[in-house]
Image (cartoon, rainbow, N blue to C red):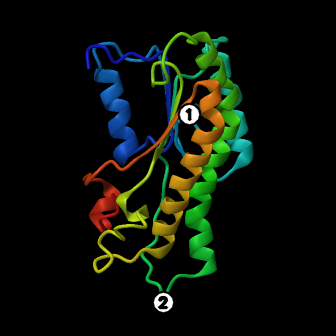
Amino acid sequence: MEGFKMFSVLVTGSDRGIGLGLVQRFVELPHPPQLLFATCRHPEGPEGQLDVTDPHSIRAAAKEVEKYLTGCGLSLLINNAGIACATTLASETAQSMAAVYATNTIGPMLVCQAFLPLLKRAALRNICLEMSCRKAAIVNMSSSYGSIATVDEWDWHQDVGYRCSKAALNMLTRCQSQSYSICGILCVSLHPGYVKTQLEAERRYY
């Protein structure tokens, strides 16, 4: 981790679980980011608010972050915010699936659209570097539940809306990679593995 250096990082859904853990690990790095934006839907203070289901909140957050970056751009955007509903194929509804998609799939798309100019700026400032988190990158937090090939743990939790939202997120990442790579922006989906979080205490999603 000695050579792992980034100028700026933004993490959504950072008030608990994986998001909070990521923020803590970034702070503990030998060379932590100069700017670390930890955002969530309902922060305790006026700063750090970013509701990924609210386009106005997303745009406001992008403008606020831009002020702190002072023209340097955003090095790494981690779309971590996510929700899940315990459903089966028989009990899933349009409302519950739409709610999960709004946070897990549409949210990351809107966040990336809003922060794309800042990511492009970072990539341009580091044009000599190969695509990486040091240059400019988008990380979409996915799940093995989104795998079409394995349909992981179906007998344990069906969670249809969650699975579909993560499968769609993986395709979104692929589309972003097709479009944003020409700007020097790395785009990846990650399955974080089995992580003990408050969400996992109710059911094992990740």
Residue 32 can be seen, yes or no:
yes
The structure residue drawn at horizontal position 62% and vertical position 76%, both measured from the top left corner, is 95
**Disc 2 target residue:** 90
Towards the viewer: 65 or 192:
192
- Which quadrant: the N terminus? top left
Up the image or down, 161 lies above or below 133; here it is below
Binning the other alpha carbons within 10 Å of mark 2 as few (below 14), some (14 to 19) or many (20 upward) gives: few
The structure residue drawn at horizontal position 55% and vertical position 60%, both measured from the top left corner, is 168
Give coordinates of residue 110: x percent, y percent: 67, 46
Towards the viewer: 77 or 58:
77
Residue 61 can be seen, yes or no:
no
The structure residue drawn at horizontal position 61% and vertical position 51%, both measured from the top left corner, is 107
Residue mark closest to the camera, 2 vs 1: 2
Give coordinates of residue 105: x percent, y percent: 58, 56
Considering the numbered disc 1 on the image, is that residue within a helix, a strand or a loop?
loop
Among numbered discs 2 and 1, the one appearing first in the sequence = 1
Q: What residue type is labelled 2?
A: Ala
Looking at the image, residue 22 sits to the left or right of residue 83; the answer is left
Towards the viewer: 112 or 39:
112
Give coordinates of residue 111: x percent, y percent: 63, 41
- Residue 112 is marked as none
Binning the other alpha carbons within 10 Å of mark 1 as few (below 14), some (14 to 19) or many (20 upward) gives: many
- Which quadrant: the C terminus? bottom left
Considering the numbered disc 2 on the image, is that residue within a helix, a strand or a loop?
loop
CA separation in Å, label 2 and label 1:
38 Å
**Disc 1 target residue:** 48
The structure residue drawn at horizontal position 67% and vertical position 12%, both measured from the top left corner, is 71
Q: What residue type is labelled 1?
A: Gly
Up the image or down, 107 lies above or below 57; here it is below
Quadrant housing residue 27: top left
